[in-house]
Image (cartoon, rainbow, N blue to C red):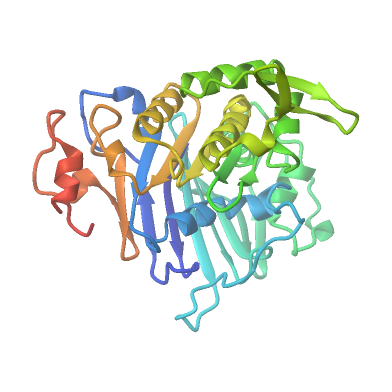
Amino acid sequence: MLAEFKVRNYRNFRDELQFSLESRKNYEFNQEVIYNEIIKDAVIIGYNASGKTNLGYAIMDIIIHLTDKGENREGKVSNIYYSNLYNEDDIVSFVYKFKFGSSFLEYAYEKKNARQVIRECVKIDGKKIIVNDKDTCFVNLKGSETLNLDNWNNAISLVKYIYANTVLDKEDKECQVFLKFMNFVNQMLWFSSTERLRALGANASGGNMLENICELENGVDDLEKFLHAAKLPFKLLEKDMGEGRTIYCKMGDREVTFAPLMSSGTRALVFLYLWYMQRDDFAFIIIDEFDAFYHTDLSIAIIRKLVMEENIQVIFTSHNTDIISNELLRPDCYFVLSDNMIQPFCNLTDKSLREAHNLQKMYKAGAFYGQ
């Protein structure tokens, strides 16, 4: 899982921003949100223009050069305002720390644009495993001894090249950690239902949302149940009218196409369902402004549903203070993003926060530093 992320000079993050998901609190409630001493489920609260969306983009930057899933639906990667406009330095730096079992893997790299890595370094438990830094390039993984770096085009990440062209020793611990890291990155997903339905990362292939649901096993039936649970009593069916399968809705004796009937909230919920039904393919999900179109009860139900997924790390961003509660998460799982800093509630007060504390009331009263 992702344990820590640092970024500097990316978009609105001129100075280094450090986002730590390592749990250092021993709360005895809602312990299911912690896995292997890492915060598995987190909510980031911040005002407009605080950088919530940009933080998600920054975390997902890694997939652009390490996977084949970093392009948008038009096959393009955006370089617009990649580095901070107030900084003359155009080098953007990223540092990720992952925890797999008892081992930590750190991946640091620098770029001047979204596509090309200038330098990169992989460390496992403090030991340098891969280095790509100007004239110094090496790999120290069992199975890479015969790898010919003369065939490597430095327009491609060295880490990606090694992963694609080396048969690593799967019995070796360091190789195991490296492969877990690459699998994790290939299973990262970011999506948002605000403005337009957007997704980036694992399985973000685009296409028609309703047609994609029809491709899922029992997709339409399960969507109907999902909507019923959200108190939306649509009666759905799948039909093929010669232009591909899509979803229809029964309205009395009539059967009409479902798409024009969907409100913004229903459309956002259907979009969430599409990704939820593919959850076995994901290790990490960022849902940006996830509850922009939901009422509070539905937002809470969605968080509870995703918290139950043991093998997925989920980060939500939101404006909704009604989801700030110890009944859902814990003080170390709620983060405030403001002024190029992000900290959990428990680090923003001198009080010893307990389960009985009303976190929402405290937040609204300005009890947390820097909010």
Q: Is residue 133 above or below residue 271?
A: below
Residue shown at 72%/21% (left/top)?
254
Q: Is residue 161 visible?
A: yes
239 or 218, which lies in front?
A: 239
Quarter of the view holding residue 146: top right
Considering every residue shown, the one lying at the far bottom of the view is 88
Residue shown at 70%/55% (left/top)?
158
Q: Position of residue 58 (x, y in %)?
A: 51, 57
Q: Is residue 346 left or right of residue 96?
A: left
Q: Is residue 181 visible?
A: no
128 or 181, which lies in front?
A: 181
Q: Is residue 242 left or right of residue 197?
A: right
Q: Which quadrant is home to the C terminus?
A: bottom left
Residue shown at 74%/50% (left/top)?
161
Q: Is residue 355 left or right of residue 255?
A: left
Considering every residue shown, the one lying at the far left of the view is 351
Q: Position of residue 330 (x, y in %)?
A: 26, 33
Considering every residue shown, the one lying at the far right of the view is 242
Q: Is residue 290 above or below residue 11?
A: above
Q: Position of residue 231 (x, y in %)?
A: 46, 22
Considering every residue shown, the one lying at the far front of the view is 253
Q: Position of residue 52 (x, y in %)?
A: 42, 55
Residue shown at 43%/29% (left/top)?
302
Q: Is residue 323 above or below residue 197?
A: above
Quarter of the view holding residue 247: top right
202 or 219, which lies in front?
A: 219
Count the marks: 0
